[in-house]
Amino acid sequence: MSNNRFFELISRKLSGEATNEELSEIEEILASDPAAAARFKMLSQFWNQHDAGDELIVEEAFEKLLPKLDIPDATTQKSRRSNKNFLLSVAAAASVVLITGSLVFLKRNFNRDAIANHRLALLEKKNTKGVKSFITLADGTKIWLNADTKIQYPRNFSGNTREVYLSGEAFFDVAKNPARPFIIHLENGTVKVLGTSFNIRAYNNEKTIEASVATGRVAFIPKFAPGNKQDTIFLTGDKKLRYLLTKKQVIVEPTTSREDMAWIGGKLVFKAMTFDEISLELERSFGKKIIFLSDSAKAFRLTGSFQNNSLDEILFYLSKSTEFNYKINDEEVMISDVSTKLP
């Protein structure tokens, strides 16, 4: 029997897609071929131990396993090319060129379905614009949620990890449990910790993810496009990470964690930020749409620190450092440079 057929059967068995006839065929092979039985055992362990959510990590791990499977010429370029058509038909993934690409592909999709079903059962806390909140998870982890933020989490954690899903900004004080890492899934990255406190800003409509640490250590894993590998970045106290999504670039710099979490106490801190960037923060904090009537005003760079001030007060003091016109209505704010009249 060819290696292709063997791996096709094993892939279908591990993913739960094998027919009764295929299961019978597999059992006959394993009973009559000790080498095949040994390979199946290693592949089963690989399947159970690796999370296929990150394709690059899974494939890299399998590259290390491949020599142990003792498959003749399995690692040669010629063998990989000859198996390409097989992998296309079984895995429907032309980019996966390992001889067991079908296994990786099927496990990845199997896990995606499982994750999708799992997330349907999660509890959800969602803040609208202008609203902040606080929650405590079943393990004792405390989370402060900023405005326009959503988090999904289980009623009780099970398994070897504690996993939540975040969109927006939150400050975490994670309960220590070295045996069960705390994992935060973002749209464009993952954060892993054991027990620490840190701030994450990851709004889906912004071009930058920020993470800063107050205590302990945080591991940030950027989500890159397939083919672009990025190592895990570790952050310690008073360090900030900025992941520039458009450039796929990670920057680590000193910070003051008290300022990064100042929003919890109703404080807004702007340091040489463009008015366009500040407007997003003001929209979330006060729930009013900000409309620029002149593009030049968007580029104004402004600095200020405000503690529990009204929107009118913030705009008034900002306008004293750089002149601009503004008008606040019930649902929106209009802003322009001084040369443009407001309606």
Image: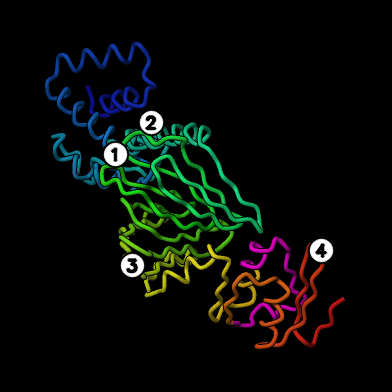
Gap between marks 1 and 3 measured at Cα: 30 Å
Where does the magenta region start and end? 280-302
Is 17 positioned to the left or the right of 120 in the image? left
Residue occupied by mark 3? 237
Residue occupied by mark 4? 330
Q: Nearer the viewer, residue 314 or 303?
A: 314
Q: Nearer the viewer, mark 2 or mark 1?
A: 1
Q: Amino acid at mark 3?
A: Gly
Gap between marks 4 and 3 measured at Cα: 42 Å
The earlier-in-sequence mark between 4 and 3 is 3
Q: Nearer the viewer, residue 84 or 122?
A: 122
Residue occupied by mark 1? 50
Relative to 261, is 118 above or below?
A: above
The earlier-in-sequence mark between 1 and 3 is 1
Q: Amino acid at mark 1?
A: His
For the point 60% across and 82% down, which residue is it?
302
**Residue 255 drawn in magenta:** no
Q: Amino acid at mark 4?
A: Asp
Gap between marks 4 and 2 measured at Cα: 58 Å
The earlier-in-sequence mark between 2 and 1 is 1
Q: Position of residue 284 (x, y in %)?
A: 64, 61
Residue occupied by mark 2? 90
